């Protein structure tokens, strides 16, 4: 047995509007997840403890994104024996909030396992990013496991996606296309305000209930075919978004946050309140607004670090949510540029 190693990986926003399954960024807030890992001589991966998940996650490594990611990472290192894991989820970011919680655990577990077994991580610090990029496809497969085992009976096409895990591993904005993970950095002055609707009013019983949308359901709601014109619009916005990050242009960035392919279908089927709330945010001064990953969390971008404008916007958006019977946790946050790290 070795000592426990502790790794943190941030929460993430995937898609950022037009970048469905290919673009995401890491957040400073809300916090992501922690994974403790240590070597053991007995072969295989074992999850010893999971905290903060309200009993919702499986200890079976083939049904748990962190366990699966650790197992697949370990398989890369000949001679590696076993790993024990303890997982601490941020209990304020429930499963099904859209903030990349399963990706955060997977990234932390994969990176912790690599730190235990990959000799490159004990030497040249510049190799850290190389190793992290190698872990992206492993963690993307873990995401598929998370989705396909989370909601029995839901058929999900293309469950594997690397957007959240790439950002959780590498930090900043990351564009991921199949086996390539491309770091885009960030716009330092950029400020996201993330709304995590966590309670919804049941109008029949007049009581508030927890509000979560599992990614499996959000992916099952997607159209099988899309209109060419919508694809062109969305591609244009994705290109603009990448250009805006590269040129540090917040206004171009905000204006590019528009998705004609995925958000409309999800909003219509699963989040009927969303389009009104988004319209209110944009009419009240937000530069951009989109769902965080598969929702129901969403974010707005504000033009400056102005607390006055942001404060007024938060109130306006919260009022619009309340009118729809929702209450939200709100986080105003810069981008996390470090990604998964030993702490
Ligand atoms: N890109 C994925 C989706 C992220 O939107 O389904 C899931 O959190």
Image (tube, rainbow, N blue to C red):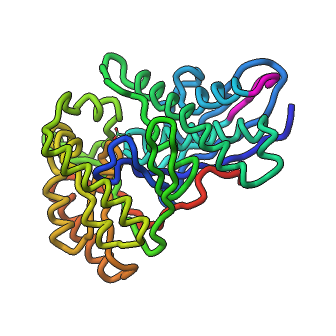
Specify the quadrant of the image occupied by residue 134: top right
Q: Quadrant of ligand 1?
A: top left
Which residue is rendered at x = 36% and y = 27% of the image?
158
Position of residue 71 in the picture relative to residue 120 (left or right): left
What x and y, as percent, mark residue 312? Answer: 26, 77
In the rendered structure, the answer to whether residue 22 lies left or right of residue 237 reads right
* Magenta residues, start to end: 77-85
For the point 54% across and 52% down, the residue is: 10
Assign the C terminus to one quadrant of the image.
bottom right
Between 96 and 62, the one lying in front of the other is 62
Q: Position of residue 334 (x, y in %)?
A: 47, 67
**Quadrant of residue 283 in the image?**
bottom left
From the viewer's side, name the closer residue of 235 and 282.
235
Q: Nearer the viewer, residue 236 or 320?
A: 236
Q: Residue 160: image x %, image y %?
A: 43, 29
Which residue shows up at 86% across the image and 31% down it?
1
Horizontal and vertical percent position of residue 70: 65, 30
Q: Is residue 83 magenta?
A: yes
**Image point (37%, 45%), residue name:** 98
């Amino acid at each position: 047995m070795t000592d426990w190693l502790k790794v943190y990986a941030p929460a993430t926003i995937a898609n950022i509007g037009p970048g469905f399954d290919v673009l995401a960024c890491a957040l400073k807030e809300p916090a992501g997840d922690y994974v403790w890992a240590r070597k053991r001589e007995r072969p295989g991966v074992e999850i010893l403890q999971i905290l903060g998940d309200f009993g919702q996650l499986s200890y079976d490594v083939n049904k748990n994104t962190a366990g699966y990611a650790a197992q697949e990472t370990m398989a890369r290192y000949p001679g590696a024996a076993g790993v024990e894991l303890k997982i601490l989820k941020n209990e304020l970011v429930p499963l099904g909030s859209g903030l990349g919680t399963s990706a955060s655990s997977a990234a932390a577990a994969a990176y912790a396992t690599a730190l235990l077994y990959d000799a490159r991580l004990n030497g040249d610090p510049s190799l850290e990013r190389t190793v992290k990029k190698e872990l992206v496809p492993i963690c993307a497969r873990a995401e598929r496991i998370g989705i396909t085992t989370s909601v029995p009976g839901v058929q999900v096409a293309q469950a594997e996606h690397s957007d959240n895990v790439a950002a959780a591993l590498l930090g900043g904005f990351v564009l991921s296309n199949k086996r390539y993970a491309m770091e885009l950095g960030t716009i330092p002055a950029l400020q996201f305000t993330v709304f995590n609707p966590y309670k919804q009013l049941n109008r029949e019983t007049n009581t508030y209930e927890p509000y979560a949308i599992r990614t499996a359901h959000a992916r099952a709601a997607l159209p099988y075919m899309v209109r060419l014109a919508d694809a062109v619009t969305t591609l244009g916005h994705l290109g603009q978004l990448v250009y805006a990050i590269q040129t540090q242009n917040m206004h171009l960035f905000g204006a590019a946050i528009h998705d004609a392919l995925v958000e409309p279908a999800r909003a219509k089927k699963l989040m009927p309140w969303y389009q009104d709330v988004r319209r209110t945010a944009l009419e009240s001064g937000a530069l951009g607004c989109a769902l965080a990953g598969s929702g129901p969390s969403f974010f707005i971008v504000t033009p400056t670090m102005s607390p006055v404008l942001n404060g007024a916007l938060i109130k306006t958006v919260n009022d619009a949510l309340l009118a729809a019977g929702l209450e939200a946790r709100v986080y105003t946050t810069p981008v996390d540029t470090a990604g998964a790290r030993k702490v």
